[in-house]
Image (tube, rainbow, N blue to C red):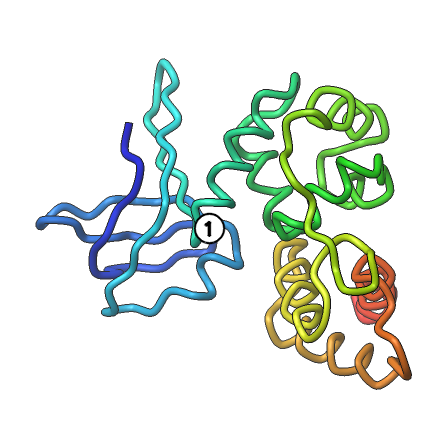
Amino acid sequence: MIASVRGVVAGLGPDTAVIEVGGVGLAVHCAPGTLAGLRLGSEARLATTLVVREDSLTLYGFAADDEKHLFELLQTASGVGPRLAQAVLAVHSPDAIRKAIANADLAALTRVPGIGKKGAERLVLELRDKIGPVAIGPDGAGGVVGGAWPEQIRQALVGLGWTVAQADQAVATVAETVDGPTPPVPVLLKQAIRLLGKTR
């Protein structure tokens, strides 16, 4: 098992990074949020999971060990493979995933391309007792609070296929509508998707 890699970022693609370790370039599949934090020519450390199939060896990389843990945990649910697990992490932060599963928030889970209502119900049923502690904000609500929402929404939109420029524009427009307490991230994300839907 390759638990992590550290080396120079030798290449970046739409869903992979090439990390050069000891003269060997390793292709690592990453979610958009992880790729966004990498820079060509700079050193990076990624937590990794090696997925072994009869006809392939695929290395998946994550910016944090917590993401890797959730990636592996999601695959213990029936019907969830590595690509779907990575799609979940592309749309939601680890805290948001835990909160959605703990609260049986099917609407949040079905926002992930490839997960329907039955799939979301299965995730809740099979993983609710395994996900660990859910982050609690100062107001007693779960999830990330404060200034983290713009980055969460930006990453989610890019993960859903919009460009970084489109995501930035949508986040800026949604930010202008926030007056007073910040609404939950799923509500803000829905607003951003609605805005971008008009420009597609």
Residue 27 in the image, given as x and y percentages of width and height: 30, 44
* Secondary structure under the numbered disc 1 in the rendered image: loop
- What residue lies at 41% left-to-right and 44% top-to-bottom? 29
Residue 91 vs 191, above or below: the answer is above
Compared with 127, 96 (above or below) is below
The amino acid type found where label 1 is placed reads Asp
In the displayed structure image, the side of residue 115 where residue 177 appears, left or right: right
- Going 65% across and 17% down the picture, which residue do you hit? 78
Residue 60 placement (x, y as % from top left): 41, 39
Instruction: Locate residue 145 relative to residue 59 in the image: left or right.
Output: right
The residue drawn where x is 77% and y is 28% is 124
Q: Is residue 149 left or right of residue 90?
A: right
Front residue (pair 122, 131): 131
* Above or below, comparing residue 10 to residue 64 in the picture: below
Q: Quadrant of residue 88?
A: top right
Residue lying farthest to the left in this orientation: 23
Q: Quadrant of residue 149?
A: bottom right
Q: Is residue 96 above or below residue 148?
A: above
In which quadrant will I find the C terminus?
A: bottom right
The answer to whether 177 appears left or right of 58 in the picture is: right
Q: Nearer the viewer, residue 61 or 169?
A: 61
Quadrant of the image for the N terminus?
top left
Q: Of all residues shown, which one is farthest toward the top?
A: 54
Taking depth in this image into account, of 93 and 52 the one nearest to the observer is: 93
Residue name at image x 35 percent, y 18 percent: 55
* Pointer 1 residue: 15
**Residue 158, position as x, y percentages in the image:** 62, 61
